[in-house]
Image (tube, grey):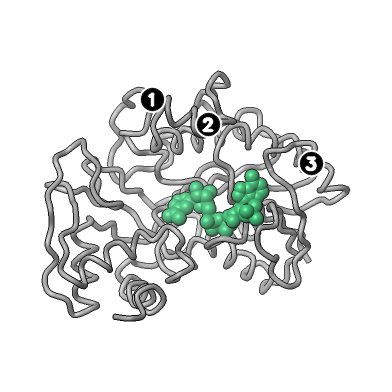
Amino acid sequence: MAQICVIGGNRYFGRHLIHLLQEAGNRVTVINRGSAPPPPGTDHVVADREDEKALTRALGGRAFDAVVDQVCYTPVHAAVARRAFTGRTARYVMTSTMEVYDPAAFPAPPPPAAVPVSEDAVDPASYPVRWDLPWRSSEALTRLLGEATSYAEGKRQAEAVFSHDPAFPFVSVRSAHVLGGGARDFTERLRHYVERVTVGLPVAVHRDPARTSFIHHEEIAALLHWAATRAVFTGPVNAASHGALTVTDLCEVIATTTASPAPAYRIVPGGEPASPFSFDRPYAMSNARATALGFPLTKVTDWLPQAVAETIADLLPER
Ligand SMILES: NC(=O)c1ccc[n+]([C@@H]2O[C@H](COP(=O)([O-])OP(=O)(O)OC[C@H]3O[C@@H](n4cnc5c(N)ncnc54)[C@H](OP(=O)(O)O)[C@@H]3O)[C@@H](O)[C@H]2O)c1
């Protein structure tokens, strides 16, 4: 029986990850601040992962075969975890994001990457860490960099902290936009589209929206489970179902699934924000590395109609 630690685990696909780990016979320790009861059968450690003394004290003498870090957002988070888990884990998997590739979310314009983007476009081993940035204040960081760059830069630099002089074998799973699960998807981005398309309200999109990557919530949980317990590779790996879609492709699937009229759109000029999955620059991910390493990925169009149906059933039951 392997000992696996999940940091987070009580909001969205982290819950399914714990279920998969338990189902496979692992002993699971969950670390969070205790806002919700832990799943039955887990060992619950209550600590704020930003507070190094509290985290180290709460961990006591525990040691793990793998840690999956679901809520690592800054290099400070990574540095605390790197110290707290040195000598305590044989493997460390950080849930990262495709936003690390967003050309609009770098502090300075990056050299253009080929699309679909492969992992080497952002190399965590050589990416610089800026300790002078106000990582402990999300308000100050957002004022300085804006929301999107703060998130992307926090993830890039967190990956970098684990990858410069690694303290343990380290994997960053760069997740596509996660969809599905109805009410479990606290981001409500799919709900935004379903609500508008099903009543004929216009959706704000760019003139020629770029394709972007998606993954099902159970699929990202399964990929994290695999990366933590069944694989031996290290470094970044992109996690995306096959078949990137534009925001208008997404709306068409919703219209077809719900037997709604053709979607209506409001065109937003390039450079201005539109609805959540409308992008005026391409950075859809290649999933070739995960596939070559042996993780079988699904097609977005195989599960999207069901995800739309769950959104209607859970979030718009009056329809
Ligand atoms: N949703 C997407 O489309 C998407 C796409 C790409 C990447 N991601 C990544 O997915 C990850 C989140 O996945 P998830 O929503 O399924 O998370 P999760 O595993 O369910 O964990 C979320 C929980 O972590 C706990 N937490 C937050 N801050 C903490 C802290 N300082 N110390 C200890 N515990 C803390 C919170 O519980 P308590 O309040 O009890 O502490 C929170 O409810 C993030 O890394 C995000 O960047 C998401």
Instruction: Return the disc, 2 or 3, that comes first in the chain's sequence.
Output: 3
Label 1 secondary element: loop
Amino acid identity at mark 3 = Ala
**Residue 258 rendering spot, x and y as whole percentages:** 23, 78
- Is 272 rendered above or below residue 91? above
Labelled pair 3, 1 in contact (Cβ < 8 Å): no
Residue, disc 2:
157
User: Is residue 289 among what the camera can see?
Assistant: yes
Q: Which residue is mark 1?
A: 107
Task: State the separation of the CA atoms marked 1 and 2.
Answer: 12 Å
Identify the residue under disc 3.
54
Query: Gap in Å between the C-alphas at discs 2 and 3?
Result: 23 Å
Question: In this view of the protein, which residue sits in the foreground, 274 or 110?
Answer: 274
Q: Horizontal and vertical percent for residue 45?
A: 77, 55
Of the residues shown, which amino acid type is indicated by label 2?
Gln
Residue 268 in the figure: left or right of residue 49: left
Residues under numbered marks 2 and 3 in contact, where contact means CB atoms less than 8 Å apart: no
SS category of the residue bearing label 2: helix
Q: Which mark is residue 84?
A: none
Which of discs 3 and 1 lies nearer the camera? The answer is 3
**Ligand 1 within 8 Å, label 1 CB:** no
Residue at 88% in and 48% down:
61
Q: Residues within 10 Å of mark 3 (few under 14, many from 20)?
A: few
- Give me the residue at 40% from left, 63% from top: 179
Question: Quadrant where the N terminus lies?
Answer: bottom right
Q: Quadrant of residue 234?
A: top right
Q: Nearer the viewer, residue 220 or 202?
A: 202
